[in-house]
Image: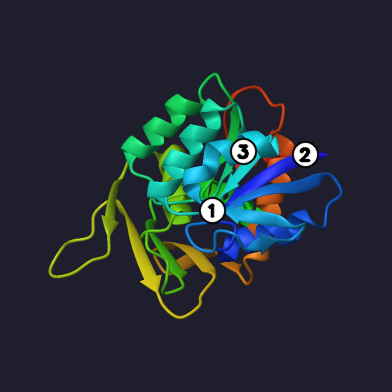
Amino acid sequence: MIKFAVAGALGRMGTLVIQEAAKVGDLQLVAGFDVAGAGMILPGGVPVSDASQLKSTLASSKAVVLIDFTVASAAVETVCSAADMGIDLVVGTTGFSPDQLSRMKAAIDGRVSAVITPNFSVGVNLFWKLVAEAATALKDYDIEIIEAHHNQKRDAPSGTALATVEAIKNALGDREVVHGREGLRQRGNEIGVHAVRAGDIVGDHTVLFAGPGERLEIKHQAHSRTAFASGAVRAARWVVDKKPGIYSMADVLGSR
């Protein structure tokens, strides 16, 4: 039985992760953390703990993997603390700064294994591969990325959109990235990135390749956050006992 903890246990993603984990037979929830609701009881009779109790609760619970869906400022501290304790990690939080990513990498290296990805969806990981293939074939076409999420999402562009930019750059080489457009400007050899925040959109990502007389669109739409939660559970089962280091969902899926 794999004992796991969830940071952001009362959030939308944390709640779904706990529900999805209950559907498999080898995961046991032993700890949950959230900025609100300390003392509330999670499924299985597990109490919600405050982040200030992170290390002591992880130690007493004997968790071997921690799943984090919170915000960047909190997640970086959680990741560093858990890594210092030798606890493997699954991180779906987005919006990290380069400095925060460096801190997490330094904490993880040589100590624990971690799956860190902006999107745990199986479909999105295929989407990135298709986008890279199309970029290679249509290297002279204009490329635009349009992403849409609910009005409560704080970071923009989304982590998935940024990973899409990197997939294109890896295929074509470095290109200028332009975030939205305003005023008078000639379009150059660039990647345009546009973010929409509205309503309760779970997550839409479109890459548009436009050339003479035609355009191709590759699109992924998430209809439910369950796609992300089930992927995170899959990653948690996979990451335990792997060689220390940082892995992607492509590693989990065996598609790298």
The local crowd at label 1, few if under 14, some if 14 to 19, many if 20 or more residues have their Cα within 10 Å, is many
What whole-number distance in Å separates the C-alpha atoms at marks 2 and 1? 19 Å
Nearest to the observer: residue 45 or residue 155: 45
**Dot 2 corresponds to which residue?**
2
Nearest to the observer: residue 135 or residue 80: 80
Residue at the extreme bottom: 199
Residue 136 in view in this figure = no
Nearest to the observer: residue 84 or residue 188: 84
Query: Which residue lies at the image location 38% right of the left edge and 46% below the top edge?
Result: 96
Residue 111 in view in this figure = yes
**Dot 1 corresponds to which residue?**
69
Q: Is residue 59 left or right of residue 177?
A: right
The image shows residue 191, relative to residue 54, as above or below, that is below
Query: Which residue lies at the image location 62% right of the left edge and 65% below the top edge?
Result: 225
Percent position (x, y) of residue 2? 77, 39
Q: Disc count in the image?
A: 3
The image shows residue 215, relative to residue 63, as above or below, that is below
